[in-house]
Amino acid sequence: MHLFSSKFVKRPAHVTELPGSVSTPQGFLAAGIAAGLKKSGKTDLGLLVCKEPCTSAALFTTNAAAAAPILVSRDESETGALQGVVVNSGSANACTGKQGLEDARKMAQRAASDAGIDVKHIAVASTGVIGQTLPMESVEPGIGHAADLLAEYGGGDFAEAIRTTDKIDKDGAVEVTLSGGAVHIGACAKGAGMIAPNMATMLVFVTTDAVVPASLLQNLLARAVESSFNSMTVDGDMSTNDCIYVLASGKSGVAVDQDTGDAQLFGDALSAVCKGLALKMVADGEGATKVVELKVTGAADGDEAAMVSRAVSNSTLVRTAFYGRDANWGRIMASAGAALAGEPELLADIHYEEVCLASGGAACDEKPDSVRLKEIMSQQEISVTLDLKRGQAASTMYFSDLTHDYVTLNAEYTT
């Protein structure tokens, strides 16, 4: 719940937030159980299925060291007609060679058999430590146990089962009003560290009971991801296991029709849900205390805007300054200038919220209000505008601050 808690995401007028998760839309069953993959004994295996044919869409990490479940799902599943996903946390099944591929296939086969679905319509996802093979003696019977527990109210358990270092719940549901009636979207995600543009260490699962052609669903997903999961960073490290799946059961009977404008309405709702989840990931960035919205404007073109926004957002100097509540705009200017190395002099403007800190590449003539600036730097969400004064293109990124806790958690991740 509370997908729209951040000031950086707005709930569209035709969208109503509901209690629920991925099993809220009609047709979906879910379960989450403890299979023994986590030392803590917490839930670590989830199963989400629709017993009837679906349309679907998917996007995967572009990391060259992509994990076994990514390779199996991407290359062997029918990603336009998925009816379910089986997921484990506690082990990434990445960099595990032929054994990892065999284990990912076994997960899909067992889930398909127990759920009564063709194996080509099952996707696999994993998250956790890289380089460790799965304890299949626990995973396979665990999948059977999860299949026995599949229920319409199982979405919350499924959402819990996919988390690792997450501290914030990342699931919810909405009702979307279209011309032909109401449809529902349910979603859940995990992600807190190893977060970078081009997706992140994240697993995202979205369900809907709308009738949506697979090709349209893929286009709408790509649009939604661009303004959400591809516009955020916690530490700049691309994961081996990133994936997002959207499954449409069609059980509402309400079609998403481009001719009526419903595709735009549904796409706006999907984008808002994805952005809400993405901002929760940034807020949950390991050890994070702040979320910063960086709006780069005045770029020569879109590629330049994206390059600068990513360079600034991933700067350790910039991010530690926000953690220390230090309005050190010079770090932003320097990072942007480094990204534009070799270009003419950078005469940029920088604003923290409404306060001008730099104009024309130098400190503003008027000294900023120190009281207001202190208030801004104490906020949990801060908006920063960097105007490059080089053109008309723009790009927005969301990033978290870098804290002592991030270093501690990741220094001790496998120990």
Image (spheres, rainbow, N blue to C red):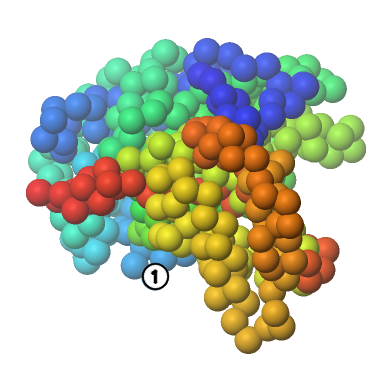
Q: Nearer the viewer, residue 228 or 290?
A: 290
Q: Nearer the viewer, residue 325 or 186?
A: 325
Amino acid type, label 1: Ala
Expressed as whole percent of the image width and height from the top left, the position of residue 385 reads 68, 51
Q: Is residue 364 visible?
A: yes
Residue under the image location 21 percent in, 42 percent down: 90
Using the rendered view, name the quadrant where residue 37 is placed. Answer: top left
Using the rendered view, name the quadrant where residue 255 is placed. Answer: top right
The residue indicated by pointer 1 is 64
As drawn, 404 above or below 372: below
As drawn, 341 above or below 4: below
Expressed as whole percent of the image width and height from the top left, the position of residue 32 reads 30, 25
> Residue pushed farthest right?
259
Residue under the image location 44 percent in, 52 percent down: 321
Q: Is residue 223 visible?
A: no
Q: Nearer the viewer, residue 223 or 149?
A: 223
Residue under the image location 14 percent in, 28 percent down: 41
Within-10-Å neighbours for mark 1: few <14, some 14–19, many 20+ = few
Expressed as whole percent of the image width and height from the top left, the position of residue 407 reads 25, 51
> Residue pushed farthest bottom?
342
As drawn, 312 above or below 104: below
Secondary element type, mark 1: loop
Q: Nearer the viewer, residue 396 or 54?
A: 396
Using the rendered view, name the quadrant where residue 276 is placed. Answer: top right
